[in-house]
Amino acid sequence: MESSRRNFFLSLPALAALPASWTAFSTALRAASSTPDSEAYWSLVKRQFPLSDDLIYLNAANVCPASRPVLDRHAEFMRDFQSNPSFQNRAKYEAMRERLRDKLARMLRVTSDEIAITRNTSEGTNIVVKGVDLKPGDEVLITDHNHPSNNDSWKVRAQREGFTVSSLTVRVPAASREELISQIEKAVTPRTRVIAVTHVTSTTGIMYPAREIAEIARRRGIWMHLDGAQSFAALDVNLKEIGCDSYSASAHKWLMGPLEAGVLFVRSDRIASVWPSIVTAGWTDHLKGARKLEVYGQRDDPRIVALESAVDFTLLIGMNAIESRMRFLATSLKEQLSQIPGVRLKTNLEPELSGGVVKADISRVPTKQAYDSLWNEHRISIAMTPSGDSQGLRFSPHIYNSRQEIQRTVDAVKALAS
Ligand SMILES: Cc1ncc(COP(=O)(O)O)c(C=O)c1O
């Protein structure tokens, strides 16, 4: 990733073609005397986001704001498209789509033929859910902390086609990596055809040992699907090392990209065995690699440019630096919340068992009341689960958050819990 960062300025189109906000940001970053371990550096990054000053936005796990350089480039190409929708003007998007595919592939350490450009994680996962061959008697293994797109989707298909879906109950917080691995291994039967898990859960933020689970699956010829909604562009994900069969993610979460854009990876030796969910003009079984999974009729071409810009923005800062900063903020929040009497942290503290999603419960205050109070009294935007084993307040900080915002959030929770 670091070498990608060094090559960044070479891989972008001529700087003159970029909006002023891009040029200003990249020039400021290069001129900055501070480095990614200083607050001054991150406040320069924060200033690129059009977030309201009075808002503490801690909901990256749901939707992230796009930075001004990305928004400006998106707007520029929307204007270009609408001012001249001719085939001739739009022809350039084909090359842009391939350049984007290449960048996404490099980011995830796979090949561009293994990448489909989708509309979000849900769609990518559903392409796999609908596309793999399964018959009555087969079994799909999921967990009860999977998102509905990787949980109910399997159950709906199973109802129609008569295979079985077995759901594992996730312990909160996780006891250890070994327990997560052995729970899966013990649940596998000779009938298991798919293991579908979540890289980092949105419920309580557990990070699954994806490589070890992929290894269990691979030894037995089982398909391993990984939901990457909470890991893509939050963590430096290396899919080659993980070895899963498929991985799906959204651009509007940690990548800070456009809404309704996503990525689906299917490993090269598995692509031929996935049936496309949508077949329309432009589709043929001879499309190279995963491209056959992204033909949905007319697509929003300027969004491709916005998605590429979001990847470029990420590479400009560096994926390692982004993951470190995000982890620094999440860890600081977890450590401080866990010290507050009456607050129960539901997310693991260990970095190998967690990412950027933080869940905590205040014992004396109903979750909805605490959620409303954080918003109404402090303008702190988070998510929450009102009941069940993952009940609690969900905080998900990202690179546009400051240490001071984390401190103000901790103080607000402290006041509520006292
Ligand atoms: C783990 C997980 N998977 C899938 C999704 C669905 O993402 P999208 O709505 O972008 O398809 C989410 C959304 O929060 C999620 O947290």
Image (spheres, rainbow, N blue to C red):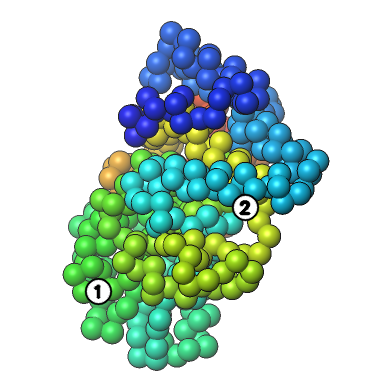
Depth check: 131 or 365 in front?
131
Q: Amino acid at mark 1?
A: Gly
Depth check: 7 or 135 in front?
7
The percent coordinates of residue 224 (x first, y second) are: 33, 67
Tag 2's secondary structure?
Answer: loop
Q: Amino acid at mark 2?
A: Glu
| Circle 2 Cα neighbour tier, 10 Å, few/some/many (<14 / 14–19 / ≥20) | some
Can residue 343 be seen at all in this image of the molecule?
Answer: no
- Apparent side of residue 305 relative to residue 29 in the rendered image (left or right): right
- Apparent side of residue 136 relative to residue 48 in the rendered image (left or right): left
Q: Which quadrant of the structure image shows residue 235?
A: top left
Tag 1's secondary structure?
Answer: loop
**Mark sitting on residue 346:** none
The percent coordinates of residue 407 (x first, y second) are: 50, 26
Q: Which quadrant of the structure image shows residue 379?
A: top right
**First in residue order: circle 2 vs circle 1:** 1
Residue at the spot x=37%, y=55% of the render?
Answer: 199
User: Which residue matches tag 1?
Assistant: 221
Depth check: 203 or 20 in front?
20
Can residue 208 be seen at all in this image of the molecule?
Answer: yes
The percent coordinates of residue 394 (x first, y second) are: 51, 47
User: Which residue matches tag 2?
Assistant: 260
Q: Residue furthest front?
A: 88
The percent coordinates of residue 139 (x first, y second) are: 35, 82
